[in-house]
Amino acid sequence: MNSLVPRARAAATDELRIIVNGGDVAKASIEAYLKPFQAETGIKVTPITDQINFAQLELMVKTNSVTADVVLLSQGSTIVAGEQGFLEPIDYSIFRKDKLEVSSISSSTRTE
């Protein structure tokens, strides 16, 4: 991915900050994914019960003030964000590719 935007990252900590939207979706995500992940890995997970849109993501990256490690975006926003270099590629040297669920990832956002 080529981009004129410098890489922006959330602060390096032993914590993951994940935007999980709000309401029942957030509650379900926290129970189904975040709590089990935290219990299994020991990595502290801080859910952010808010929504984010493409413009907010773009602003975080361009101002180098990233406040979340994982965000939920629409498929269209994910594709555009990947094309513009706003997303970090998956480092397959630390994640087993066969254990990641990539069936829902568009080929234009993959960085294999």
Image (spheres, grey):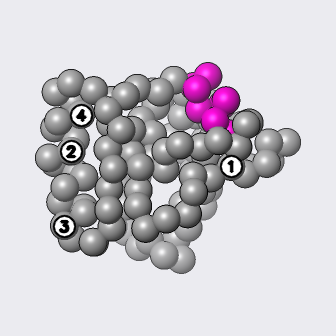
Mark 1 crowd level (few <14, some 14–19, many ≥20, 10 Å Cα): some
Task: Depth check: give the residue in front, 66 or 53.
Answer: 66
As measured in the structure, the alpha-carbon distance from the residue carrying label 2 to the one carrying label 3 is 12 Å
Residue 21 lies left or right of residue 108; in this view the side is left
Label 1 to label 2, Cα distance in Å? Answer: 26 Å
Instruction: Say few, some or many: other residues with alpha carbon within 10 Å of mark 4 (under 14 / 14 to 19 / 20 or more).
Output: some
Residue 45 or residue 75, whichever sits in front: 45
Q: Name the residue that disc number 3 marks.
A: 39
Q: Is residue 3 above or below residue 88?
A: above
Mark 1 lies on a secondary structure that is loop
Along the polypeptide, which appears first: circle 1 or circle 2?
1
Q: Which mark is residue 22?
A: none
Q: Amino acid at mark 1?
A: Ala
At horizontal 33% and vertical 67% (from top left) the residue drawn is 43
Which residue, given by chain and number where applicable, does mark 4 sit on? Answer: 26
Looking at the picture, how far across and down is residue 111, in whole percent? 62, 55
Label 2, residues with CA under 10 Å away: few <14, some 14-19, many ≥20: many
- What amino acid is at disc 2? Ile
Residue 18's spot in the image, x, y percent?
39, 45
Which residue is situated farthest in the bottom direction here? 93
Tag 4 and tag 2, C-beta contact below 8 Å: yes
* Percent position of residue 83, x then y: 69, 38
Q: CA distance from mark 4 to mark 3?
A: 18 Å
Which residue is disc 2 drawn over?
30
Query: What is the three-letter code of the residue carrying label 3?
Result: Ala
The residue lying at 60 percent from left, 61 percent from top is 112
**Rounded to the nearest whole Å, what is the CA distance between mark 3 and mark 1?**
28 Å
Give, as a single range, the part of the protein colored magenta. 54-61
The majority secondary structure of the magenta stretch comes to helix
Element under label 4? helix
**Circle number at residue 8:** 1
Where is residue 25 shown, x and y percent of the image? Answer: 21, 30
